[in-house]
Amino acid sequence: MSDSLIKPRIERPSFSQMIEAKAPLLLVPVLMVIGLFAIGSGSTWLTLTAAGLAMGMMIFIMASGLTVIFGLMDVINFGHGAFISLGAFAGFTILGLLGGWIESPSIALNLGAVLLAVAFAMLVTGLAGYGFERLIVKPVYGQHLKQILVTMGGLVVTQQLIYVIWGPDEIVLARPAAFQGSFVVLGAAIEKYRVLAIVIGLALFVAMRLVLNRTRIGLLVRAGVQNGEMVEALGYPIEKLFLAVFMVGCALAGLGGVMWGMYQETITAHMGAEVMISVFIVVIIGGLGSIEGCFIGAMLVGLLTNYTGFLIPKLALVSTILLMGAVLMWRPQGLYPVVKAH
Amino acid sequence: MSDALLSLNGVHTHIGPYHILQGVDLEVPRGGVTVLLGRNGAGKTTTLRTIMGLWQASKGTIQFDGTEIQKETTPAIAQREIAFVPEDMGIFTDLTVHENMLLAARNSAIDEERLGWIFGLFPPLKTFWQSAAGNLSGGQKQMLAVARAIIEPRKLILIDEPTKGLAPAIINAMIAALKELKEMQTTILLVEQNFSMARAVGDTVAVMDDGQIVYSGAMAELAADAGLQERLMGLSLEAHQ
C-alpha cells in the first residue's frame, strides 16, 4: 500500500484544549497562593501548608488503592476502611513488640520499627484482601448495588474481628522518639512526623507512576482499566490481575492505616470508616481510577482542610464537600477521568 | 479427515434470556479467508465472541486444531494463537500506539522485521508510534486493531467488520493487508457486510440467518450467482457493491 492512499493526520488539541488538560496541575499551587494571602503570616502559612501536605499524602496513600481497584475492577469497595483499621492495629502490634526500638534515641532503630510495622501491616492487609476478594467481592463482580451491600457487611465483620482480637477500647499509638516534636524552618514549626508522611507519600506516588508507566504489569493495569475484555482477548488472565491489584490496594490501605494511626496517635476499629469520607471525596475529585487525579485531589483536600480549619473553623467540616461540588461542576467526571471502553 | 482449522458443531449461545446462536455448524479451512455474511442481528458477532470464549456456548462443540475449546477461558483460547479484532476495535485509547502493540506481542519484545512489514501495510502507525491511540482517526484505529492481531504470527485471526464506517482508501488498505496475510497462509475468519471486500479476499463463505448457518461454500460460487444471493439474503449482493 502506498503512503499516498492514506495521509496521516492527527487531531492535535487546540491551545485552549491543552490549557484545559493541564489546568488541574495548577490547582494545588493556586490554592497555596490563595492560602498565603488569606492567612497573611508566612510562618503560619508554612506550618499549615506542611500539615496540609502531610495530611493529603496520608489520604493519598489510603485512597490510591481504592481508586485503582475501582478503575480496574469496577468494584465499589465500601469495605476499604476495614483495611485501614486492620493495618493500624497490625502495625500497633509490631510497634508494641518493638518498644525498645521506639523509645531508643537512635533514628535507625526508630525507622526500623516503623518499616517493620508498615511491612507487617501491608502483609496482613494484603492477605486479608485476598480472602476479601475471593469470598466477598468475586461473587458480585459487575453488580454495583450488591457490591455496596456486601463490602459494607465486610467492613462491619472486620471491625467486629478487631474488637475480638484487640478489644473495643481506643488504643494509644505512640510515635517513635525520632518522629516526635517539631523543628523550626523560617520561623514555622513543622512536625517531624509530617515530614516523614510527605516523604513516604511522595515516594509511593513516584513508585506507582513508575510501575504503571514503565513496567509490563503497569501497562496491563492501565489497559485493563480501559477495557478488561480486550486484555483477556489478548491472552492475559485478567482475573489474576484483579486479585493482585486488590491485594496491593488493600496493602496500601494498611500502610495508610499505620501512617494515619501514628498521625492521630490513637487507633480504633472504626477509624478507617471515619476517614473513608475524605478518601471517597479524594477519589471522586481525582476521577475514578486515576492515580494522578487522586494525588492532586488528596493535596487539595489536605490543604483546604488545614487552611479553613485555621481561617473559618466552622467551615472546615464542609469545605472538602464544597470543593468536591465545585470540581464536579467544572469537571463532572473528576479532574482526570479514566476513559472506559464500556 | 477434514482440513478445517476451526469447526463449530451445533453451537448454541444464550445471552440472558435471548437464544442467539441456534445450532451453528461452521468449518474454517486452514490457510484461507472464510467470510461470514448475514444481515444485522443474524449472529455473526456472537459467533466470533463465542469462539473467543467471551460468551460461553451453552451447547455444541468448538474444535480448534483438533482440541475442543468451548469450555476454555478467553485468555486460554487466545494463547492457542488466536487473535481477535472486535467490532469496536478494542483499542486502548489512553495508551500509545507503541504500548498497544507491546501488549499484543505477548510472547516477547516486538519483532523489528515484522514491525517493518506492518509499517509497510499501515504507514500511519509508524508516524504516530508514540502518540496516544485515542488521538488516531477511525481508520487509523482500525489499522492499529488489525496490526495488533498480526504483530506475532497467529494460527487464526478473527476479524469483525474491519471496514465498518471507513473511507474507500482505508478499505483498500485493509484489503491489501488481508491479501498479504492470505499469501502467508494465515487462516482468517472475517465478518463483513461490505461485499466488495468480502469478494476481494474471501475463499470460502458462510451465510448466517437467525443464529444458524444457512449456506456455506466457495465465495466464487456465491459471487457469481445473483439468484443464490437473492434467495439467501433477500437481496442481490451485486446491487450493494
Image (spheres, coloured by chain):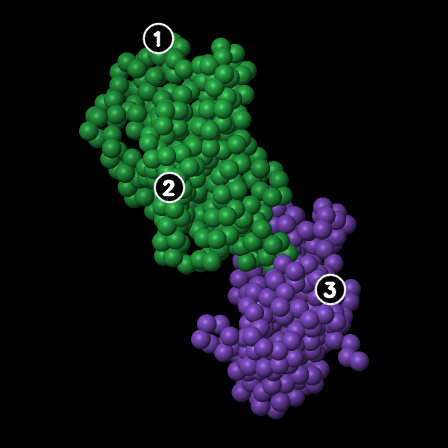
Chain colours: A green, B purple
Q: Amino acid at mark 2?
A: Gln
Marked residue chain, label 1: A
Three-letter amino acid code at disc 3?
A: Lys
The residue singled out by tag 2 in the image is: A159
Whether residue A113 is situated above or below residue B209 in the rendered picture: above
Indicate the amino acid at tag 1: Gly
Q: Residue at the location (32% across, 17% down)?
A: A45
Q: Position of residue B133 (x, y in %)?
A: 56, 49
Cα–Cα span, label 2 and label 3: 53 Å
Tell me which numbered mark, 2 or 1, is placed earlier along the sequence: 2
Disc 1 target residue? A187
Mark 3 burial class by Cα count in 10 Å: few <14, some 14-19, many 20+: some
**Residue depicted at 74% across the width and 75% down the height:** B4
Q: Chain of mark 2?
A: A
Question: Callout 2: helix, strand or loop?
Answer: helix
- Label 3 vs label 1: CA separation? 71 Å
Q: Element at badge 3? A: loop
Residue at image coords 26%, 26% = A308
| Snapshot quadrant of residue A1 | bottom right
Query: Does A69 appear above or below B81?
Result: above
Which label was assigned to residue A114?
none
Q: Residue at x 46, y 29 (%)?
A: A93
Residue tagged by mark 3? B155
